[in-house]
Image (tube, rainbow, N blue to C red):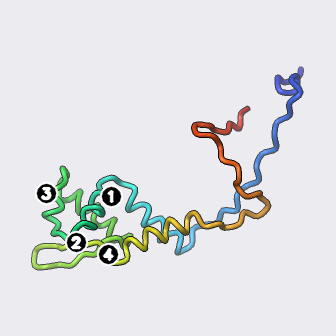
Amino acid sequence: METTHAARGRERPAPPAPLPVTLPSAEGERLARVFKALSHPVRVEIVSALSACAGACCGDIVRNLPLAQSTVSQHLAVLRASGLIEMRGEGRCCHYRLASDARVLVETAIRQVFAARGCVGLAPNTEQAPAGACRKDTE
């Protein structure tokens, strides 16, 4: 019995060649930390607020968010681990500010992710799919 595709005279296209993906390097891990830090709307809001001022105490940040202090502290810890913000202790208050190279860090991360790495055996992506289009492997 013939398949529907064979009956119509169409052959299935060959599957695409696998991408040459490698395990993350130290640089890949650093990039992932930056993107993870910016993957939550609360952390984006904190970075945005800190970029508009010289810095703020944890209590000030907490007062401007509808979250518990412990939750805000967890978000601040993720931002610190990524290198986007810095913390300085002043008595009982932790003072946070945007890292001086935060903007460069984010711009560099984006540039590196989209840098041409040279796909071995694959043609460059010159054809863009129309908006909303999706290639289905089952067709």
Residue name at image x 82 percent, y 36 percent: 12
* Element marked by disc 1: helix
Residue name at image x 49 percent, y 71 percent: 108
Residue name at image x 21 percent, y 73 percent: 54
Residue type at mark 3? Arg
- Badge 1 or badge 3: first in the primary sequence: 1
What's the CA distance linking mark 2 and mark 4?
9 Å
Residue type at mark 4? Ala
What's the CA distance linking mark 1 and mark 3?
16 Å
Q: Badge 3: few (under 14), some or many (20 or more) residues near its Cα, within 10 Å?
A: few
Residue name at image x 30 percent, y 71 percent: 85
What's the CA distance linking mark 3 and mark 2?
14 Å
| Relative to 40, residue 28 above or below | below
- Badge 3 or badge 2: first in the primary sequence: 3
Q: Position of residue 65 (x, y in %)?
A: 19, 53
Question: Which residue in the protein does label 3 denote?
Answer: 63
What's the CA distance linking mark 2 and mark 1?
15 Å
Residue 96: give its label.
2
| Relative to 15, residue 95 above or below | below
Find out whether the residues at labels 3 and 2 contact each other: C-beta distance under 8 Å.
no
Question: Which residue in the protein does label 1 denote?
Answer: 44
* Element marked by disc 3: helix
Q: Badge 4: few (under 14), some or many (20 or more) residues near its Cα, within 10 Å?
A: some
* Element marked by disc 4: loop
Residue type at mark 1? Val
Q: Badge 1: few (under 14), some or many (20 or more) residues near its Cα, within 10 Å?
A: some
Question: Which residue in the protein does label 4 denote?
Answer: 99
Quarter of the image that includes the N terminus: top right
Q: Position of residue 121 (x, y in %)?
A: 79, 61
Residue type at mark 2? Tyr
What's the CA distance linking mark 1 and mark 4?
14 Å
